[in-house]
Image (cartoon, helix red, strand yellow):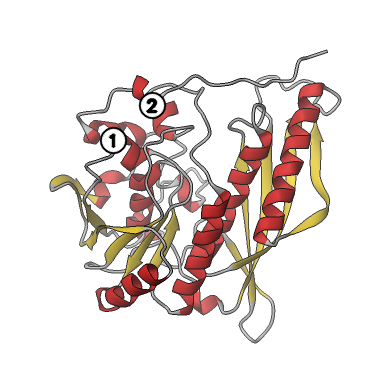
Amino acid sequence: MKEIIQKETEFSINSIAEPDNIENIIFSLIVNPNLSSINYFNDFSEFPVSPSAIGTTDSDETGLFDLDSDGRSIAMSTHALHHHLESDPKKATEILISRAARKMYCQGAQPVAISAMLYHIDFGDPNGQNISSGAKQGLENVAQKFNLKISDRKIRFDHFSCNGPFPPTIIISMISMVGNKEKITNHAFKKKGGNIFVIGRSVNDLGSSEYLEFYHGIEDSPLPAFNIDTEIRIQQTLRKLHEHDLLESASPVGKGGLFFTLLRAGIPNELGFDITTDAEMRIDSFLFGEAMGRVLVEVNPVKQDEFVDLMTGIKMPFFTLGHVTKGEIRIDDISLGYIDKMTPSK
């Protein structure tokens, strides 16, 4: 009988030297298939996709479906996670569902239901049972806190008697209501001069990041920083911002951290960004850390004061990151070239 895996990672962020050259890291990470700009627009063909082929109405991996002639629609998205599913299945599941919900709220949709599927699980083995039990607890906890309905069987299984090279993976599908699909807010920057803000707090955290795994080759690290109550506050904040029509674009900070979230926002309309990092934080953590609880938003300068007043009034942490440029990418007054330089070569 196999033992239940309960492995504590000993990784410390201080074991990684703070980098001197951010540009080298960026161009190393761009070749990572998980961070390729093309990957984020669901291209599975043999032909390369140029930025001009990526329309401004794309809404990441979310599909929109009309319900009736009154303009009501539903949105559906699918997300997967395998990090730490064996060692901390409850938290890993909570993080996965929170990411999916944050993306829906960014778009102005209201999550209402989820279903889950566990892959590569031997539930006849104690470790498989541990994963299943923890994932179920995480699913139920998040559903209760986010007021989501769960499919009747809660978690379905893809039974494997032997995992082999495939790690246990949980995949969830989320369905959301859309009042009017014409008012969906997508991830793409709209025009030069837009002000860029981050809702939430940045923390010195590199856990389970693509930067840590792909650039440094460190696969055993903690899950990213996460607080479910913070996620609830962000959901409430995004609802208010959409109600007041204050957002030009919105993106959950996700894979690749803040830098790659900015990059994905800039590519559709070939726009760049000029940002200033936090001098009190490690620059790699600020740009590439994947801590939860953050949203990147673009605000029209005309609505900036209203945005700031609303955020201050509800006491939600946020900070000014920079502004949208015509195409140049600048970090701390250093130019990294233009947005077309940041796409895979053809």
Tell me the SS state at disc 2: helix
Q: Do the residues labelled 1 and 2 touch (CB within 8 Å)?
A: yes
Does 166 sit above or below residue 236? above
The image quadrant that residue 87 belongs to is top right
Q: Give left or right: position of 94 versus 301.
A: right
Mark 1: few, some, or many residues within 10 Å (few <14, many ≥20)? some
Q: Mark 1 points at which residue?
A: 282
- Of residues 138 and 252, the one nearer the viewer is 138
Pinpoint residue 292: horizontal percent, then vertical percent.
Answer: 48, 46
Distance from disc 1 to disc 2, alpha carbons, whole Å, reads 10 Å
Locate the N terminus and report the quarter of the image it occupies.
top right
Locate the C terminus and report the quarter of the image it occupies.
top left
Amino acid at circle 1: Arg
Pinpoint residue 218: horizontal percent, then vertical percent.
Answer: 45, 22
Amino acid at circle 2: Ile
Does 64 sit above or below residue 138? below
Q: Residue 204 carries which label?
A: none
Residue lying at 52% horizontally and 43% vertically, measured from the top left: 226
Q: Name the residue under label 2.
A: 13
Tell me the SS state at disc 1: loop
- Of residues 292 and 216, the one nearer the viewer is 292
